[in-house]
Image: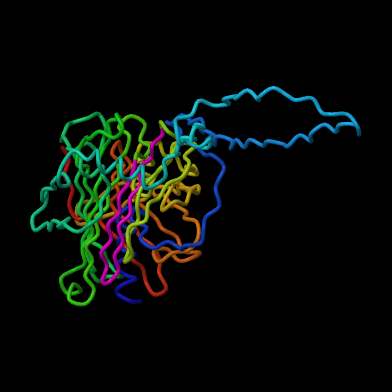
Amino acid sequence: MTHKRLLALGGLILLAGCTCNRLADAPAPQSAAVVPAAAAPVTPAVPLSPASVKETVQAVPAPQTPAGVSAPRSAEPEEVTLFPQEAGQTLEETLPSAPKEPGAADFVAQARAGQTLSAPAPDEASFKGEELIPLEGRRLSPLAYEPVQKTDTSSPWSGEELKYGVYYSFIKAGTAYIKNRGITTVNGRKAYLIQTTAFSASVIDAFFKVRDVNYSWIDAENFYSLGYSQSVREGSYKRDEWLTFDYENNRFYGEMQKKEAPRALSGPLSQRVLDMLSSLYFVRAQKLEEGQDIIFDIINREKQYPLVVKVLGKETVKTAAGKFDCIVVEPQFRGEGIFVSKGKSLKVWLTDDEYKMPVKMKTEVFIGSVSAELLEYKRN
């Protein structure tokens, strides 16, 4: 197994699929609307395109005069103005033009123009020896340029900060962090800003350096996604991608950039959805019972599909952060990607308490397994 595959897989395990850096590019079929339990459906808007108007003037044949009869002289024709026109203006120019419907680039430009801060809201180290990722040169979501307040809320993950070791079998390949950065505002809604960062171990940096940062904005009331931003740096591979979910206008929009120029993204949105990272927090907000299936819709890189999370049972897990009674869940991803091979499972151990803190994540690979285990955690 290559180090590239190992570390990218570690990024997924970080949050049971939160980064999803290079899922298979085959289009996923649109699913029937499966709405999260706490969310109300959005009535889809049907865009109306003004019909084009075309005037035709038919020539009327002149009446025939019988032979030997002189045609009567007609009066001078009266000038008729069909449309009031300015001098030199053509008929086409006087007709009202249809309003131009905004495209993906228009939504992106408007979002960029509305950025509040000149730089992304700064992060702070929470653990001893924690590295912060420089954000210069990364194409982040405009939502990353909004102020964040570390405000205590009623959620069990308020102020939560988690540190993980990422392992290939028994070899430590990197470190990852998950943080609830606090509360911000997205389209008038209060939102949690959840951030993940992933780093390759120092012994690997020399030939395959990983520095990934991901954000998700989660509605503070109902826990559906308001947008996400992924910035991947894995060896020579680079990708910046973000989407904002505009439920008021029934649309999502964003950008993606790899080596080429950034490409604007946009599409219809008919229901509340989740992204890969917010899906973990939505599951954590549910009452979990053995044998239960939790089903919701995911949008990732313009693809929408249902994600099924199975509740398998209970186990006790021991990590460097302590011993925990856990509920085991299994997200079942569609298709095959670099993180989870077809037919392979990904399991997540959540504490069996009000916090449902992820303490361990593990997936089987071609040879061995890749896992993430909790090293330290902080709250409030």
Locate residue 207, reporting x and y percent.
Answer: 21, 77
Q: Residue furthest left?
A: 128
> Please, is residue 201 above or below residue 226 in the view?
below
Q: Quadrant of residue 58?
A: top right
Instruction: Give the prevailing secondary structure in the magenta stretch.
Output: strand
**Left or right: where 300 falls relative to 177:** right
Locate residue 316, reporting x and y percent.
Answer: 32, 51
- Residue interval drawn in magenta: 227-247
**Count of all numbered marks drawn on residues in the image:** 0
Locate residue 349, reporting x and y percent.
Answer: 34, 51
Front-most of 260 and 353? 260
Front-most of 344 and 148? 148
**Left or right: where 175 falls relative to 363:** left
Decide whether residue 305 is among the magenta residues. no
**Left or right: where 215 falls relative to 30:** left
Front-most of 69 and 183? 69
What residue lies at 32% left-to-right and 34% top-to-bottom? 219
Q: Quadrant of residue 169?
A: bottom left
> Please, is residue 201 above or below residue 305 in the view?
below
Front-most of 298 and 157? 298
Q: Residue furthest right?
A: 67
What residue lies at 41% left-to-right and 53% top-to-bottom? 301
Locate residue 148, reporting x and y percent.
Answer: 17, 37
> Please, is residue 39 above or below residue 357 in the view?
above
Q: Quadrant of residue 80?
A: top right
